Amino acid sequence: MKRLSELYGMRIYSDRAHSIGTIEDAIIDDKEGMVAGFVFGRKEGKAISIPYNCIMAIGDVVLVSSKKAEQAGA
């Protein structure tokens, strides 16, 4: 298990080895008390994020599913 603070700055890659960005912030579902996604950039003042269910693995980098990431706007 990792602390949220350890994830900031981690590189995000798709399962096709494309660099997507780095984790800048987390989105928390305060009703469920769970991480809902990660912010990796901003476009026109709005946060660009990846839903947590797109994450395949977290280790030295964050690996996300290409198909789900594309649907999320990544």
Image (tube, rainbow, N blue to C red):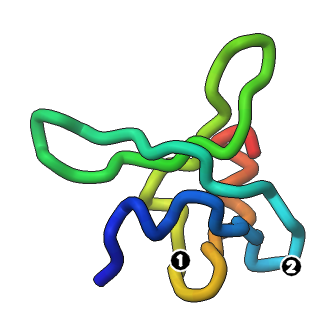
Height in image: 58 above or below 52? below
- On the image, the x and y values in percent for residue 35 come to 31, 52
Residue drawn where x is 64% and y is 42% of the image: 72
At numbered mark 2, what does the secondary structure look like: helix, strand or loop? loop
Height in image: 18 above or below 38? below
Tell which residue pokes out farthest to the right in this image: 18
Q: Nearer the viewer, residue 22 or 18?
A: 22
- On the image, the x and y values in percent for residue 34 come to 22, 52
- Is 29 positioned to the left or the right of 9 in the image? left
Q: Nearer the viewer, residue 27 or 15?
A: 27
Residue drawn where x is 68% and y is 54% of the image: 69
- Is 2 positioned to the left or the right of 51 in the image? left
Callout 1, which amino acid?
A: Met
Is disc 1 surrounded by few (<14), some (14 to 19) or many (20+) residues within 10 Å?
few
Residue corresponding to mark 2: 17
Residue corresponding to mark 1: 56
Considering the image in quadrants, where does the N terminus appear?
A: bottom left
Q: Quadrant of residue 53?
A: bottom left
Callout 2, which amino acid?
A: Ala
Q: Nearer the viewer, residue 53 or 1?
A: 1
Tell which residue pokes out farthest to the front in this image: 5
Is disc 2 surrounded by few (<14), some (14 to 19) or many (20+) residues within 10 Å?
few
Height in image: 54 above or below 24? below
